[in-house]
Image (tube, grey):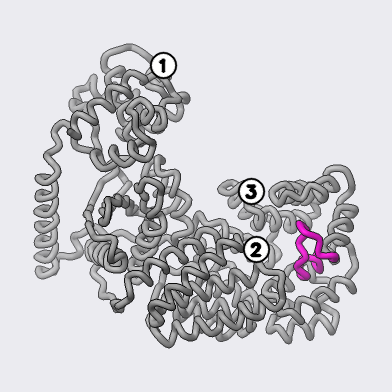
Amino acid sequence: MSQTFIKRIEQIILSNLENEKFGVSELATKMGLSRSQILRKIKSITGRSSNVYIREIRLREAVKLIFNTDLTASEIAYKVGFSSPSYFNKCFLDYYNKTPGEFKKANEEKELINISLPKKSSIKNRPSYWVWIVLLVMIISLFGFYFEKKIINGDINKFPQYASIGVLPLDDYSENRDFDYLASGITEAINLELSKNKSIRVISRGSCERFKNNKNLPYTKIAKELDVDLLLEGSVFPNNDSILVVVQLIKPFPKEKHIWSNKYHHSTNNVLQLVQNISNEIATEISSTLKPKSFNRKIYKINPEAYNLYLKGRHLWNTQKTRYESLINARQYLEESIKIDPNFAMAYVTLTETYISLNKLTGDNNERIANRENARKTIDIALDLDKSLAEAYITKGNLIGKFDWNWNKMREMAVKGLEIEPNNANARHLLSNYYTIKGNYQKAIDEAIIAESLDPLNPVTGCLVAESYYIAGDFNNSIKKYNEVLELEPDYGFALNGIGYAYYQKGNINKTMKSWRRLQTIMKNDSLGWYYDNTSFMESLHFYLNKAKLNTPGFCSNPTVISSIQMMTNKTSDAFEYLKIAYKNKNEDLPIMITYPDFYPLHTKPDFKDLAQNIGVILPN
Protein backbone atom coordinates (compact mmCIF):
# COMPACT_ATOMS: atom_id res chain seq x y z
CA MET A 1 0.00 0.00 0.00
CA SER A 2 2.74 2.44 0.98
CA GLN A 3 4.80 1.55 -2.11
CA THR A 4 1.80 2.17 -4.35
CA PHE A 5 1.22 5.55 -2.67
CA ILE A 6 4.86 6.60 -3.08
CA LYS A 7 4.95 5.41 -6.68
CA ARG A 8 1.92 7.56 -7.45
CA ILE A 9 3.55 10.54 -5.66
CA GLU A 10 6.72 10.14 -7.74
CA GLN A 11 4.74 9.93 -10.98
CA ILE A 12 2.96 13.19 -10.22
CA ILE A 13 6.17 14.97 -9.25
CA LEU A 14 7.96 13.75 -12.38
CA SER A 15 5.09 14.85 -14.61
CA ASN A 16 5.43 18.35 -13.14
CA LEU A 17 9.21 18.33 -12.90
CA GLU A 18 9.88 21.56 -14.83
CA ASN A 19 7.22 23.50 -12.91
CA GLU A 20 9.25 25.44 -10.34
CA LYS A 21 6.04 26.39 -8.49
CA PHE A 22 4.92 22.79 -8.02
CA GLY A 23 5.03 22.07 -4.29
CA VAL A 24 3.17 20.40 -1.43
CA SER A 25 -0.15 22.20 -1.99
CA GLU A 26 -0.22 21.31 -5.69
CA LEU A 27 0.76 17.72 -4.90
CA ALA A 28 -2.03 17.42 -2.34
CA THR A 29 -4.57 18.68 -4.89
CA LYS A 30 -3.39 16.16 -7.49
CA MET A 31 -3.67 13.34 -4.92
CA GLY A 32 -7.10 14.46 -3.71
CA LEU A 33 -5.83 14.86 -0.14
CA SER A 34 -5.51 17.76 2.28
CA ARG A 35 -2.12 19.41 2.74
CA SER A 36 -1.79 18.02 6.29
CA GLN A 37 -2.68 14.49 5.10
CA ILE A 38 -0.03 14.55 2.38
CA LEU A 39 2.56 15.93 4.81
CA ARG A 40 1.80 13.23 7.36
CA LYS A 41 1.71 10.31 4.92
CA ILE A 42 4.97 11.19 3.15
CA LYS A 43 6.75 11.75 6.47
CA SER A 44 5.51 8.47 7.96
CA ILE A 45 6.58 6.42 4.91
CA THR A 46 9.85 8.11 3.87
CA GLY A 47 11.04 9.79 7.05
CA ARG A 48 11.40 13.04 5.09
CA SER A 49 9.30 16.17 4.97
CA SER A 50 7.29 16.62 1.76
CA ASN A 51 9.38 19.55 0.51
CA VAL A 52 12.61 17.67 1.11
CA TYR A 53 11.24 14.59 -0.65
CA ILE A 54 10.20 16.64 -3.70
CA ARG A 55 13.63 18.27 -3.80
CA GLU A 56 15.36 14.88 -3.58
CA ILE A 57 13.42 13.62 -6.60
CA ARG A 58 14.39 16.76 -8.53
CA LEU A 59 18.06 16.20 -7.62
CA ARG A 60 17.86 12.53 -8.60
CA GLU A 61 16.51 13.48 -12.01
CA ALA A 62 19.27 16.09 -12.30
CA VAL A 63 21.85 13.32 -11.89
CA LYS A 64 20.28 11.42 -14.78
CA LEU A 65 20.48 14.51 -16.98
CA ILE A 66 24.12 15.05 -16.00
CA PHE A 67 24.96 11.49 -17.08
CA ASN A 68 22.84 11.31 -20.22
CA THR A 69 22.92 14.80 -21.75
CA ASP A 70 25.33 17.61 -22.57
CA LEU A 71 23.16 20.25 -20.90
CA THR A 72 24.87 22.86 -18.73
CA ALA A 73 24.23 22.97 -14.98
CA SER A 74 22.01 26.02 -15.44
CA GLU A 75 19.94 24.29 -18.12
CA ILE A 76 19.57 21.22 -15.93
CA ALA A 77 18.49 23.41 -13.00
CA TYR A 78 15.54 24.75 -14.99
CA LYS A 79 14.74 21.29 -16.38
CA VAL A 80 14.25 19.86 -12.88
CA GLY A 81 12.25 22.77 -11.48
CA PHE A 82 14.83 25.05 -9.83
CA SER A 83 14.19 28.73 -10.54
CA SER A 84 17.75 29.67 -9.55
CA PRO A 85 20.85 27.87 -10.92
CA SER A 86 22.89 29.07 -7.93
CA TYR A 87 20.35 27.58 -5.50
CA PHE A 88 20.38 24.36 -7.54
CA ASN A 89 24.18 24.18 -7.27
CA LYS A 90 23.99 24.79 -3.53
CA CYS A 91 21.34 22.08 -2.97
CA PHE A 92 23.28 19.66 -5.17
CA LEU A 93 26.52 20.33 -3.28
CA ASP A 94 24.83 19.99 0.13
CA TYR A 95 23.20 16.72 -0.90
CA TYR A 96 25.92 14.94 -2.91
CA ASN A 97 28.98 16.74 -1.48
CA LYS A 98 29.97 17.57 -5.06
CA THR A 99 29.00 20.29 -7.51
CA PRO A 100 27.23 19.10 -10.70
CA GLY A 101 30.51 19.57 -12.61
CA GLU A 102 32.52 17.58 -10.05
CA PHE A 103 29.83 14.93 -10.04
CA LYS A 104 30.05 14.48 -13.82
CA LYS A 105 33.85 14.45 -13.78
CA ALA A 106 33.93 11.84 -11.00
CA ASN A 107 31.63 9.59 -13.02
CA GLU A 108 33.76 9.97 -16.11
CA GLU A 109 36.77 8.90 -14.06
CA LYS A 110 34.84 5.87 -12.76
CA GLU A 111 34.95 7.26 -9.24
CA LEU A 112 31.19 7.39 -8.93
CA ILE A 113 29.00 4.45 -9.89
CA ASN A 114 25.90 4.44 -7.71
CA ILE A 115 23.49 7.24 -8.63
CA SER A 116 20.80 6.38 -6.09
CA LEU A 117 19.89 8.80 -3.34
CA PRO A 118 22.85 8.84 -0.95
CA LYS A 119 21.16 9.69 2.31
CA LYS A 120 18.25 7.29 2.64
CA SER A 121 17.58 3.70 1.69
CA SER A 122 15.49 3.23 -1.44
CA ILE A 123 11.74 3.10 -0.85
CA LYS A 124 11.47 0.07 -3.16
CA ASN A 125 13.92 -1.85 -1.02
CA ARG A 126 12.39 -0.74 2.27
CA PRO A 127 11.27 -3.71 4.45
CA SER A 128 7.78 -3.83 5.83
CA TYR A 129 6.92 -1.68 8.85
CA TRP A 130 7.14 -4.40 11.48
CA VAL A 131 10.33 -5.94 10.06
CA TRP A 132 11.85 -2.44 10.16
CA ILE A 133 10.83 -1.99 13.77
CA VAL A 134 12.37 -5.35 14.77
CA LEU A 135 15.60 -4.50 12.95
CA LEU A 136 15.73 -1.07 14.61
CA VAL A 137 15.31 -2.60 18.07
CA MET A 138 18.06 -5.15 17.32
CA ILE A 139 20.43 -2.43 16.08
CA ILE A 140 19.81 -0.23 19.11
CA SER A 141 20.24 -3.21 21.44
CA LEU A 142 23.49 -4.23 19.76
CA PHE A 143 24.73 -0.63 19.93
CA GLY A 144 23.89 -0.51 23.62
CA PHE A 145 25.75 -3.77 24.26
CA TYR A 146 28.76 -2.60 22.26
CA PHE A 147 28.85 0.75 23.99
CA GLU A 148 28.56 -0.82 27.43
CA LYS A 149 31.41 -3.20 26.58
CA LYS A 150 33.55 -0.24 25.48
CA ILE A 151 32.96 1.51 28.80
CA ILE A 152 33.82 -1.60 30.79
CA ASN A 153 37.05 -2.01 28.84
CA GLY A 154 37.97 1.63 29.45
CA ASP A 155 37.76 2.41 25.74
CA ILE A 156 35.30 5.30 25.95
CA ASN A 157 37.78 7.81 24.52
CA LYS A 158 37.58 6.08 21.16
CA PHE A 159 34.05 7.40 20.74
CA PRO A 160 33.76 10.75 18.94
CA GLN A 161 33.45 13.66 21.35
CA TYR A 162 31.22 16.59 20.38
CA ALA A 163 30.89 19.93 22.09
CA SER A 164 27.55 21.37 21.02
CA ILE A 165 24.03 20.42 20.01
CA GLY A 166 20.89 22.15 18.73
CA VAL A 167 17.48 20.64 19.46
CA LEU A 168 15.23 21.61 16.57
CA PRO A 169 11.52 22.13 17.32
CA LEU A 170 9.64 18.88 16.89
CA ASP A 171 7.10 18.91 14.04
CA ASP A 172 3.44 18.47 14.86
CA TYR A 173 1.73 16.32 12.21
CA SER A 174 -1.75 16.40 13.70
CA GLU A 175 -4.57 17.40 11.37
CA ASN A 176 -5.13 20.87 12.84
CA ARG A 177 -1.84 21.28 14.74
CA ASP A 178 -3.72 20.49 17.95
CA PHE A 179 -0.58 18.94 19.42
CA ASP A 180 1.80 21.82 18.73
CA TYR A 181 1.92 22.60 22.45
CA LEU A 182 2.90 18.98 23.17
CA ALA A 183 5.61 18.99 20.50
CA SER A 184 6.85 22.24 22.03
CA GLY A 185 6.83 20.71 25.53
CA ILE A 186 8.81 17.66 24.43
CA THR A 187 11.36 19.87 22.67
CA GLU A 188 11.82 21.99 25.77
CA ALA A 189 12.09 18.95 28.06
CA ILE A 190 14.82 17.43 25.88
CA ASN A 191 16.67 20.76 25.92
CA LEU A 192 16.42 20.94 29.70
CA GLU A 193 17.72 17.43 30.26
CA LEU A 194 20.66 17.89 27.89
CA SER A 195 21.54 21.24 29.51
CA LYS A 196 22.38 19.42 32.74
CA ASN A 197 25.45 17.91 31.08
CA LYS A 198 28.35 20.32 31.62
CA SER A 199 30.38 18.70 28.83
CA ILE A 200 27.84 19.71 26.14
CA ARG A 201 26.98 23.21 24.94
CA VAL A 202 23.25 23.15 24.32
CA ILE A 203 21.86 25.95 22.16
CA SER A 204 18.89 27.68 23.77
CA ARG A 205 15.44 27.09 22.45
CA GLY A 206 15.01 30.67 21.23
CA SER A 207 17.62 30.23 18.49
CA CYS A 208 16.48 26.79 17.38
CA GLU A 209 12.89 28.05 17.21
CA ARG A 210 13.86 30.08 14.12
CA PHE A 211 13.89 26.83 12.14
CA LYS A 212 10.45 25.70 13.25
CA ASN A 213 8.87 26.58 9.91
CA ASN A 214 12.03 26.49 7.85
CA LYS A 215 13.38 22.97 8.16
CA ASN A 216 13.85 22.56 4.44
CA LEU A 217 17.24 24.19 4.82
CA PRO A 218 20.13 21.72 4.59
CA TYR A 219 21.32 20.43 7.94
CA THR A 220 24.76 21.83 7.18
CA LYS A 221 23.36 25.36 6.89
CA ILE A 222 21.29 25.05 10.08
CA ALA A 223 24.29 23.70 11.98
CA LYS A 224 26.50 26.52 10.69
CA GLU A 225 24.00 29.18 11.73
CA LEU A 226 23.63 27.65 15.18
CA ASP A 227 27.38 26.92 15.38
CA VAL A 228 26.81 23.34 16.57
CA ASP A 229 28.30 19.91 15.87
CA LEU A 230 25.04 17.97 16.21
CA LEU A 231 21.35 18.44 15.48
CA LEU A 232 18.44 16.60 17.03
CA GLU A 233 15.20 16.62 15.05
CA GLY A 234 11.90 14.82 15.44
CA SER A 235 8.22 14.62 14.64
CA VAL A 236 4.99 14.00 16.54
CA PHE A 237 2.32 11.79 14.90
CA PRO A 238 -1.01 11.66 16.80
CA ASN A 239 -3.36 8.74 16.11
CA ASN A 240 -6.67 8.52 18.00
CA ASP A 241 -5.71 8.08 21.68
CA SER A 242 -2.01 7.50 21.13
CA ILE A 243 0.97 9.42 19.85
CA LEU A 244 4.15 8.39 18.03
CA VAL A 245 7.31 10.47 18.43
CA VAL A 246 10.22 9.87 16.06
CA VAL A 247 13.63 11.45 16.78
CA GLN A 248 17.05 11.27 15.18
CA LEU A 249 20.49 12.67 16.00
CA ILE A 250 22.39 14.06 13.02
CA LYS A 251 26.07 14.90 12.57
CA PRO A 252 26.11 17.38 9.64
CA PHE A 253 29.87 17.65 9.13
CA PRO A 254 32.01 16.80 7.26
CA LYS A 255 29.34 14.65 5.60
CA GLU A 256 25.81 14.32 6.90
CA LYS A 257 25.42 11.23 9.06
CA HIS A 258 22.56 9.94 11.18
CA ILE A 259 24.23 8.58 14.31
CA TRP A 260 21.21 7.67 16.43
CA SER A 261 17.42 7.40 16.12
CA ASN A 262 14.45 6.06 18.05
CA LYS A 263 10.65 5.89 18.17
CA TYR A 264 8.37 6.32 21.18
CA HIS A 265 4.73 5.27 21.20
CA HIS A 266 2.53 6.28 24.15
CA SER A 267 -1.05 6.86 25.07
CA THR A 268 -2.09 10.51 25.12
CA ASN A 269 -3.91 9.79 28.37
CA ASN A 270 -0.57 10.08 30.15
CA VAL A 271 1.19 13.03 28.55
CA LEU A 272 3.50 13.44 31.53
CA GLN A 273 4.89 9.91 31.22
CA LEU A 274 5.29 10.45 27.48
CA VAL A 275 7.34 13.64 27.88
CA GLN A 276 9.40 12.29 30.76
CA ASN A 277 10.25 9.04 29.05
CA ILE A 278 11.20 10.70 25.79
CA SER A 279 13.27 13.53 27.27
CA ASN A 280 15.05 11.33 29.81
CA GLU A 281 15.84 8.52 27.39
CA ILE A 282 17.03 10.85 24.65
CA ALA A 283 19.22 12.86 27.06
CA THR A 284 20.68 9.70 28.56
CA GLU A 285 21.36 8.13 25.16
CA ILE A 286 22.95 11.22 23.69
CA SER A 287 24.94 12.06 26.82
CA SER A 288 26.25 8.51 26.98
CA THR A 289 27.20 8.61 23.32
CA LEU A 290 29.01 11.92 23.70
CA LYS A 291 30.48 11.63 27.17
CA PRO A 292 29.16 9.69 30.19
CA LYS A 293 27.76 12.01 32.80
CA SER A 294 25.67 11.33 35.87
CA PHE A 295 22.51 13.36 36.36
CA ASN A 296 20.66 14.24 39.53
CA ARG A 297 17.19 14.01 38.07
CA LYS A 298 14.12 14.40 40.16
CA ILE A 299 11.26 12.25 38.90
CA TYR A 300 8.03 14.18 39.27
CA LYS A 301 4.82 12.46 40.24
CA ILE A 302 2.48 14.95 38.64
CA ASN A 303 -1.13 14.58 37.71
CA PRO A 304 -1.21 14.00 33.91
CA GLU A 305 -4.13 16.42 33.45
CA ALA A 306 -2.23 19.10 35.38
CA TYR A 307 0.81 18.51 33.21
CA ASN A 308 -1.20 18.82 30.01
CA LEU A 309 -2.60 22.19 31.16
CA TYR A 310 0.91 23.30 32.15
CA LEU A 311 2.26 22.52 28.67
CA LYS A 312 -0.52 24.61 27.08
CA GLY A 313 0.19 27.54 29.41
CA ARG A 314 3.95 27.37 28.97
CA HIS A 315 3.59 27.14 25.19
CA LEU A 316 1.57 30.37 25.17
CA TRP A 317 4.05 32.12 27.46
CA ASN A 318 6.99 30.94 25.33
CA THR A 319 5.56 31.94 21.98
CA GLN A 320 3.33 34.95 22.69
CA LYS A 321 4.82 36.72 25.69
CA THR A 322 4.32 40.17 24.13
CA ARG A 323 0.54 39.73 23.80
CA TYR A 324 -1.49 40.64 26.85
CA GLU A 325 -4.53 38.50 25.98
CA SER A 326 -2.39 35.42 25.31
CA LEU A 327 -0.63 35.85 28.65
CA ILE A 328 -4.00 36.03 30.42
CA ASN A 329 -4.91 32.71 28.79
CA ALA A 330 -1.52 31.26 29.78
CA ARG A 331 -2.11 32.35 33.36
CA GLN A 332 -5.49 30.62 33.39
CA TYR A 333 -4.03 27.33 32.11
CA LEU A 334 -1.27 27.45 34.73
CA GLU A 335 -3.65 28.29 37.56
CA GLU A 336 -5.89 25.38 36.55
CA SER A 337 -2.83 23.11 36.48
CA ILE A 338 -1.83 24.16 40.00
CA LYS A 339 -5.39 23.75 41.24
CA ILE A 340 -5.31 20.11 40.14
CA ASP A 341 -1.75 19.49 41.38
CA PRO A 342 -0.67 22.05 44.05
CA ASN A 343 2.79 20.45 44.29
CA PHE A 344 3.78 20.99 40.65
CA ALA A 345 6.85 23.24 41.05
CA MET A 346 7.50 23.98 37.36
CA ALA A 347 3.96 25.28 36.90
CA TYR A 348 4.65 27.85 39.63
CA VAL A 349 7.88 28.89 37.88
CA THR A 350 6.14 29.51 34.56
CA LEU A 351 3.27 31.28 36.32
CA THR A 352 5.86 33.60 37.90
CA GLU A 353 7.35 34.40 34.50
CA THR A 354 3.83 35.06 33.20
CA TYR A 355 3.23 37.57 36.00
CA ILE A 356 6.54 39.27 35.19
CA SER A 357 5.56 39.54 31.51
CA LEU A 358 2.08 40.84 32.38
CA ASN A 359 3.62 43.42 34.69
CA LYS A 360 5.55 44.92 31.77
CA LEU A 361 2.51 45.09 29.48
CA THR A 362 -0.15 46.51 31.77
CA GLY A 363 -0.67 50.24 32.27
CA ASP A 364 -2.75 49.79 35.42
CA ASN A 365 -0.69 50.50 38.55
CA ASN A 366 -2.92 48.37 40.80
CA GLU A 367 -2.54 45.46 38.41
CA ARG A 368 1.22 45.92 38.41
CA ILE A 369 1.29 45.78 42.20
CA ALA A 370 -0.84 42.60 42.17
CA ASN A 371 1.37 40.98 39.52
CA ARG A 372 4.52 41.67 41.54
CA GLU A 373 3.03 40.31 44.76
CA ASN A 374 1.74 37.21 43.01
CA ALA A 375 5.10 36.64 41.29
CA ARG A 376 6.94 36.73 44.63
CA LYS A 377 4.51 34.23 46.14
CA THR A 378 4.58 31.75 43.27
CA ILE A 379 8.37 31.64 42.88
CA ASP A 380 8.85 31.07 46.61
CA ILE A 381 6.37 28.19 46.45
CA ALA A 382 8.27 26.71 43.49
CA LEU A 383 11.58 26.77 45.39
CA ASP A 384 9.98 25.33 48.52
CA LEU A 385 8.65 22.44 46.45
CA ASP A 386 11.81 21.74 44.47
CA LYS A 387 15.25 23.18 45.14
CA SER A 388 16.78 21.32 42.18
CA LEU A 389 15.10 23.45 39.49
CA ALA A 390 17.65 25.73 37.81
CA GLU A 391 14.90 27.71 36.16
CA ALA A 392 13.34 28.50 39.55
CA TYR A 393 16.54 30.17 40.76
CA ILE A 394 17.02 32.05 37.49
CA THR A 395 13.41 33.25 37.47
CA LYS A 396 13.76 34.40 41.07
CA GLY A 397 16.94 36.26 40.09
CA ASN A 398 15.05 37.91 37.25
CA LEU A 399 12.26 38.93 39.63
CA ILE A 400 14.65 40.23 42.31
CA GLY A 401 16.51 42.31 39.74
CA LYS A 402 13.43 43.79 38.07
CA PHE A 403 11.28 44.37 41.15
CA ASP A 404 13.62 44.69 44.14
CA TRP A 405 16.88 46.00 42.66
CA ASN A 406 18.77 43.61 44.91
CA TRP A 407 21.71 43.06 42.60
CA ASN A 408 23.88 40.80 44.75
CA LYS A 409 20.94 38.49 45.38
CA MET A 410 20.14 38.49 41.65
CA ARG A 411 23.70 37.40 40.91
CA GLU A 412 23.52 34.71 43.60
CA MET A 413 20.39 33.25 42.00
CA ALA A 414 21.93 33.31 38.51
CA VAL A 415 25.09 31.54 39.70
CA LYS A 416 23.01 28.93 41.53
CA GLY A 417 20.99 28.29 38.39
CA LEU A 418 24.16 27.87 36.31
CA GLU A 419 25.52 25.31 38.77
CA ILE A 420 22.49 23.16 37.98
CA GLU A 421 22.06 24.06 34.31
CA PRO A 422 25.34 25.37 32.83
CA ASN A 423 23.83 26.11 29.39
CA ASN A 424 21.19 28.60 30.48
CA ALA A 425 21.42 31.81 28.42
CA ASN A 426 18.95 33.63 30.68
CA ALA A 427 21.31 33.24 33.64
CA ARG A 428 24.12 34.79 31.60
CA HIS A 429 21.76 37.62 30.68
CA LEU A 430 21.23 38.32 34.39
CA LEU A 431 24.98 38.28 35.03
CA SER A 432 25.54 40.73 32.17
CA ASN A 433 23.00 43.08 33.75
CA TYR A 434 24.67 42.65 37.14
CA TYR A 435 28.08 43.72 35.82
CA THR A 436 26.50 46.67 34.01
CA ILE A 437 24.93 47.83 37.27
CA LYS A 438 28.27 47.40 39.03
CA GLY A 439 30.09 49.50 36.41
CA ASN A 440 32.20 46.62 35.04
CA TYR A 441 31.24 47.10 31.39
CA GLN A 442 33.82 44.74 29.89
CA LYS A 443 32.60 41.91 32.10
CA ALA A 444 29.03 42.76 31.10
CA ILE A 445 30.02 42.44 27.43
CA ASP A 446 31.76 39.11 28.11
CA GLU A 447 28.66 37.64 29.77
CA ALA A 448 26.44 38.95 26.97
CA ILE A 449 28.66 37.26 24.40
CA ILE A 450 28.43 33.96 26.32
CA ALA A 451 24.63 34.32 26.39
CA GLU A 452 24.69 34.85 22.64
CA SER A 453 26.86 31.76 22.09
CA LEU A 454 24.20 29.73 23.92
CA ASP A 455 21.35 31.41 22.03
CA PRO A 456 22.98 32.70 18.82
CA LEU A 457 19.90 33.36 16.67
CA ASN A 458 17.70 34.90 19.33
CA PRO A 459 17.36 38.67 18.72
CA VAL A 460 17.08 39.20 22.47
CA THR A 461 20.63 37.99 23.12
CA GLY A 462 21.92 39.82 20.06
CA CYS A 463 20.43 43.06 21.35
CA LEU A 464 21.91 42.36 24.79
CA VAL A 465 25.39 42.30 23.24
CA ALA A 466 24.67 45.45 21.21
CA GLU A 467 23.29 47.28 24.25
CA SER A 468 26.34 46.25 26.34
CA TYR A 469 28.64 47.77 23.71
CA TYR A 470 26.49 50.90 23.65
CA ILE A 471 26.67 51.34 27.42
CA ALA A 472 30.45 50.89 27.26
CA GLY A 473 30.65 53.66 24.65
CA ASP A 474 31.70 51.33 21.83
CA PHE A 475 29.17 52.65 19.33
CA ASN A 476 30.76 51.07 16.26
CA ASN A 477 30.45 47.53 17.65
CA SER A 478 26.99 48.35 18.96
CA ILE A 479 25.82 49.38 15.49
CA LYS A 480 27.48 46.34 13.94
CA LYS A 481 25.72 43.97 16.33
CA TYR A 482 22.33 45.67 15.95
CA ASN A 483 22.71 45.35 12.17
CA GLU A 484 23.41 41.62 12.58
CA VAL A 485 20.18 41.31 14.55
CA LEU A 486 18.27 43.22 11.87
CA GLU A 487 19.64 40.94 9.17
CA LEU A 488 17.95 38.07 11.00
CA GLU A 489 14.84 40.00 12.10
CA PRO A 490 14.39 43.10 9.89
CA ASP A 491 11.33 44.26 11.85
CA TYR A 492 12.69 43.66 15.36
CA GLY A 493 11.63 46.85 17.15
CA PHE A 494 14.16 46.76 19.99
CA ALA A 495 17.03 46.58 17.48
CA LEU A 496 15.65 49.48 15.43
CA ASN A 497 15.23 51.53 18.59
CA GLY A 498 18.69 50.68 19.93
CA ILE A 499 20.55 51.32 16.71
CA GLY A 500 18.85 54.73 16.51
CA TYR A 501 20.41 55.68 19.87
CA ALA A 502 23.82 54.40 18.72
CA TYR A 503 23.68 56.41 15.48
CA TYR A 504 22.69 59.48 17.50
CA GLN A 505 25.77 59.14 19.70
CA LYS A 506 27.88 58.86 16.54
CA GLY A 507 26.33 62.11 15.30
CA ASN A 508 24.54 60.45 12.38
CA ILE A 509 21.10 62.02 12.79
CA ASN A 510 19.91 60.93 9.34
CA LYS A 511 20.38 57.25 10.18
CA THR A 512 18.76 57.77 13.58
CA MET A 513 15.69 59.22 11.87
CA LYS A 514 15.67 56.43 9.27
CA SER A 515 15.76 53.72 11.97
CA TRP A 516 13.11 55.34 14.12
CA ARG A 517 10.93 56.07 11.09
CA ARG A 518 10.97 52.37 10.27
CA LEU A 519 10.11 51.61 13.89
CA GLN A 520 6.98 53.77 13.60
CA THR A 521 5.89 51.79 10.55
CA ILE A 522 6.11 48.59 12.57
CA MET A 523 4.25 50.21 15.47
CA LYS A 524 1.69 51.59 12.97
CA ASN A 525 2.17 55.10 14.33
CA ASP A 526 1.49 57.02 11.11
CA SER A 527 1.32 60.44 12.76
CA LEU A 528 4.87 60.28 14.18
CA GLY A 529 6.02 58.65 10.96
CA TRP A 530 4.71 61.66 9.05
CA TYR A 531 6.78 63.99 11.24
CA TYR A 532 9.96 61.99 10.52
CA ASP A 533 9.18 62.19 6.79
CA ASN A 534 8.23 65.86 6.59
CA THR A 535 9.88 67.78 9.45
CA SER A 536 13.20 68.01 11.25
CA PHE A 537 14.58 65.62 13.83
CA MET A 538 13.96 68.05 16.70
CA GLU A 539 10.39 68.78 15.58
CA SER A 540 9.73 65.02 15.51
CA LEU A 541 11.11 64.61 19.04
CA HIS A 542 8.98 67.48 20.37
CA PHE A 543 5.87 66.01 18.73
CA TYR A 544 6.62 62.62 20.35
CA LEU A 545 7.17 64.21 23.79
CA ASN A 546 3.90 66.13 23.66
CA LYS A 547 1.97 62.96 22.86
CA ALA A 548 3.87 60.63 25.20
CA LYS A 549 3.44 62.92 28.21
CA LEU A 550 -0.32 62.73 27.64
CA ASN A 551 -0.12 58.91 27.54
CA THR A 552 -1.50 58.96 23.99
CA PRO A 553 -2.09 55.44 22.59
CA GLY A 554 0.69 54.39 20.21
CA PHE A 555 3.27 56.65 21.88
CA CYS A 556 5.60 54.96 24.36
CA SER A 557 4.96 56.64 27.70
CA ASN A 558 7.70 54.80 29.59
CA PRO A 559 9.20 57.59 31.77
CA THR A 560 12.76 56.36 31.15
CA VAL A 561 12.27 56.70 27.38
CA ILE A 562 10.69 60.13 27.76
CA SER A 563 13.66 61.13 29.91
CA SER A 564 16.20 59.99 27.31
CA ILE A 565 14.43 61.97 24.57
CA GLN A 566 14.36 65.02 26.87
CA MET A 567 18.14 64.69 27.08
CA MET A 568 18.32 64.87 23.27
CA THR A 569 16.36 68.13 23.35
CA ASN A 570 18.75 69.50 26.03
CA LYS A 571 16.00 69.70 28.67
CA THR A 572 18.05 68.09 31.43
CA SER A 573 15.80 69.30 34.27
CA ASP A 574 12.71 67.80 32.64
CA ALA A 575 14.66 64.61 31.95
CA PHE A 576 15.56 64.23 35.62
CA GLU A 577 11.92 64.77 36.66
CA TYR A 578 10.90 61.77 34.58
CA LEU A 579 13.71 59.70 36.06
CA LYS A 580 12.26 60.51 39.48
CA ILE A 581 8.84 59.33 38.28
CA ALA A 582 10.43 56.09 37.10
CA TYR A 583 12.19 55.71 40.46
CA LYS A 584 8.96 56.31 42.39
CA ASN A 585 7.17 53.59 40.36
CA LYS A 586 10.20 51.29 40.53
CA ASN A 587 10.31 51.11 36.75
CA GLU A 588 12.18 47.94 35.77
CA ASP A 589 14.01 49.65 32.87
CA LEU A 590 15.43 52.45 35.01
CA PRO A 591 18.58 50.76 36.47
CA ILE A 592 20.05 49.79 33.08
CA MET A 593 18.75 52.91 31.32
CA ILE A 594 20.59 55.39 33.56
CA THR A 595 23.89 53.75 32.58
CA TYR A 596 23.29 54.89 28.98
CA PRO A 597 25.67 57.53 27.56
CA ASP A 598 22.55 59.67 27.03
CA PHE A 599 22.72 60.61 30.70
CA TYR A 600 26.43 61.40 30.94
CA PRO A 601 25.67 65.16 31.23
CA LEU A 602 23.82 64.41 34.50
CA HIS A 603 26.67 62.50 36.13
CA THR A 604 28.00 65.60 37.88
CA LYS A 605 24.59 66.47 39.36
CA PRO A 606 24.30 65.55 43.06
CA ASP A 607 20.62 64.55 42.70
CA PHE A 608 21.46 62.16 39.85
CA LYS A 609 24.32 60.65 41.84
CA ASP A 610 21.96 60.09 44.78
CA LEU A 611 19.40 58.47 42.50
CA ALA A 612 21.99 56.08 41.07
CA GLN A 613 23.30 55.25 44.54
CA ASN A 614 19.79 54.51 45.83
CA ILE A 615 19.24 52.11 42.93
CA GLY A 616 22.65 50.51 43.47
CA VAL A 617 24.14 51.62 40.15
CA ILE A 618 27.87 52.38 40.04
CA LEU A 619 28.57 55.12 37.50
CA PRO A 620 31.85 55.36 35.55
CA ASN A 621 34.28 58.04 36.66
Mark before the other along the chain sequence, 2 or 3: 2
Relative to residue 580, is residue 175 drawn left or right?
left
User: Which of the two residues, 206 or 596, is positioned nearer the viewer here?
Assistant: 206
Tell me the amino acid under the disc marked 3. Answer: Asp
What percent of the width, then of the height, locates residue 62?
A: 32, 22
User: Which of the two residues, 211 or 173, is positioned nearer the viewer here?
Assistant: 173
Q: Which residue is mark 2?
A: 467
Packing grade of label 3 (10 A; few <14, some 14-19, many >=20) is: some
Packing grade of label 2 (10 A; few <14, some 14-19, many >=20) is: many
Can residue 77 be seen here?
yes
Residue at image location 36% in from the left, 13% down from the top: 71
Q: Which residues are magenta?
A: 549-564
Tell me whether the residue at label 2 lies in contact with that at label 3, contact meaning CB atoms closer than 8 angstroms. no
Residue 492's label in the rendered image is none
Residue at image location 57% in from the left, 78% down from the top: 399
Residue at image location 25% in from the left, 25% down from the top: 8
Residue 491's label in the rendered image is 3
User: Which of the two residues, 507 or 177, is positioned nearer the viewer here?
Assistant: 177
Q: CA separation, marks 2 and 3?
A: 17 Å
